[in-house]
Image (cartoon, rainbow, N blue to C red):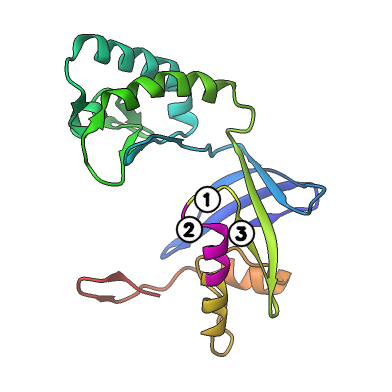
Amino acid sequence: MTLRTERTYETAVRMHFGGMILDRGHWQVTKTGDIVLRSDMQYHDLPSDDLWYLSVNSDTLADLPMIKARVQDFLERTPGESFPFATVKAIHRHPVRNNPQKTYSAFTCFHPSPVRRQSLQRLLAQIDEYLAWPDKNAFHFRPVTYKSYVFLVDLDAKFPSQKEQIVQFKNRVDGLTGSQIPWDTYIALTRERFAEETGRAEPFKTAKPGWGWFR
């Protein structure tokens, strides 16, 4: 992530064949020293009481009034106090950018468990509140110093908690060797080190079967 002096920022990811811009927008520092990123591309998701949420991006944000109408219609014509997640997921489908033959749903789940009627009923009011919420695209971070590193704690995250984020970062730093830098965390880098890290592609990794990809 680059925080520019003119108060714009850009977040990119380094991959095998180059990089990709994930986010951009404007940033500011609050009176308490926290950093607020106001994104042009990303939005907070709409959580539920169950193990699902409504994923919001620039496309599905525009769909929210339509999603509300479809959920309301679904509840009026569908009996029952709970519904299979696959059924709820089908309420909304949005074309994939650059590939309109494929679609995806804003309804996303941590585990495909049944969706309660009352959760969908609550969603109707949540959508109205969300559309009126001025900070739906504002993300808050707090700089914290540990040893020679300054890193950002995500103040909006429910999991891991702020305390857990700090503990995890300290454990990563304490386990470093040589010129390694902590992974999976925003840390302050010199201009030279930043250019070095972002100017090269990520090398291919090997995987341990059953455990996924490792750094």
Image quadrant where one finds the C terminus: bottom left
Density class for disc 1 (Cα within 10 Å; few <14, some 14-19, many ≥20) is few
- Identify residue type, mark 2: Pro
State the CA–CA distance, disc 2 to disc 1. 7 Å
Query: Residue 177's quadrant in the figure?
Result: bottom right
Badge 1 is on which residue? 157
Density class for disc 2 (Cα within 10 Å; few <14, some 14-19, many ≥20) is few
What residue is at 61 percent from the left and 73 percent from the top? 196
Q: Is residue 73 above or below residue 133?
A: above
> Where's residue 144, x and y in %?
69, 66
Q: Main secondary structure of the magenta part?
A: helix
Q: How many marks?
A: 3
**For the magenta stretch, what is the residue range?**
159-167
- Identify residue type, mark 3: Val
Q: Check residue 165 for magenta coloring.
A: yes
> Where's residue 87, x and y in %?
19, 27
